[in-house]
Amino acid sequence: MTKKFSILIPAYNAQKYIDKCLTSIISQTFKNFEVIIIDDGSHDKTFEVCQEYANKDNRFKIYHQENSGVIVTRNKLLSLANGEWIVFIDADDYVDSTYLANFHEGIIKHPQTDVVVCDYIRVEKHNRTQTIRKPFKNKEDYLKKLLGWRTINTVLWAKAIKNKLIIDRKIKFENNIHLGEDLCFISRLFYYANDITYIPYAKYYWNRANANSLSLSTALLNNYIPLYKTIKDFYKNQSDYKLYAATIDNTIVRVIQELFLAKIGDLDTSTFSIDESLLTIINKIRLNCIKRNCYWLIILSEKIERNLKKIHNKLFIR
């Protein structure tokens, strides 16, 4: 019998957390699912922990590979999935026992939908939790928020995606994207979706207790430029590109603005006058942008200029 859900889990050195993850899955009230785990060359006992579950429950399948990175791993997971619906879960996260049941209920109520999205719970150190709700009205509303600056859930989890949509459109994770590969995947896949449905349940637990802090460093922000360039190039080829163009441009402006601010931390402004400091920052970031993607500067220069006042205030007004 075809499984209703394929739960896909990429795992790397997840021994400390994956037992809780798999226990939460095996406790699901909705039983028609398979679990596919790829151990991506872990150095700990991640594979052994997963194998124990596979030995006890034939719905669990565990594979081991040499370390290849999350993009290769996720593409392989998709190729192995047999379920009608795809559900990604990170190895260090866990879910409520009714997680799949709520998705199934949403699918039954909305038979034309290709994607069901739910809320999630952020878990910090000392088990402090915060429920994150990011509702949307329809597919168009979701895509506008998705292409904006973190105004909607942009990750793979807390979603059920129809497998046929992925197969028919031949959507995969792009090897040239090293940051935000999930956003790139989702922005393409969800464009082709017949409809996207929101259900107001927070059943996914996003474990932040073990996460490394990702500050908006220059290196991190630099990786956003090729990400949004790839997304923009995709939408540029679509018939209704204009509907989303402004949203994508505004996001790129935000990224470049953050790059300006990140550069401030690299400069010693104590030896400069006000005008010299500001000019130095402007010239450095412009040169950086020109070297990488000169047309961003041409297209967005007016919007960037409007943000210079904000940068000036951050530098010199205490």
Image (cartoon, rainbow, N blue to C red):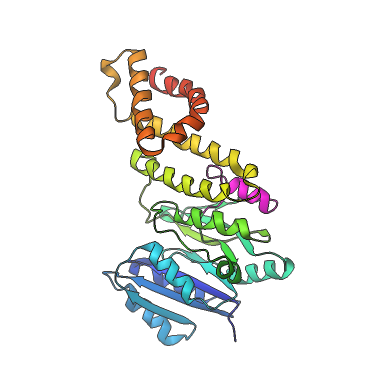
Nearest the viewer among 12 and 119 is 12
Comparing 47 with 303, the one in front is 303
Measured along the vertical axis of the image, is residue 147 above or below residue 313? below
Q: Is residue 77 above or below residue 134?
A: below
Please state which of residues 84 and 128 is positioned toward the viewer in this rendering: 84
Residue drawn at point x = 37 percent, y = 19 percent: 278
Residue 97 visible at all: no
- In the rendered image, which quarter contains the C terminus? top left
Q: In this view, does 213 lie above or below 60?
A: above
Q: Which residue is drawn at 60% across and 71% down?
A: 164
Instruction: Pinpoint residue 249: horizontal percent, then vertical percent.
Output: 54, 38
Q: Where is residue 118 in the image (x, y as percent from the top left)?
A: 61, 59
Q: Reply above or below: 134 against 12.
A: above
Task: Please state if 246 lies on the left or on the right of 56 as rendered.
Answer: right
Q: Position of residue 66 (x, y in %)?
A: 29, 71
Q: Give the extent of the magenta segment.
A: 136-154
Q: Residue at 40% of width from left, 34% of height from top? A: 259
The quadrant of the rendering that contains the N terminus is bottom right
Q: In this view, does 160 lie to the left or right of 75?
A: right
Side of 163 where 125 appears, left or right: left
Instruction: Note whether residue 311 is visible.
Output: yes
**Where residue 206 appears, x then y in whole percent?**
48, 58
Say left or right for 195 vs 75. right
Q: Residue 59 magenta-drawn? A: no
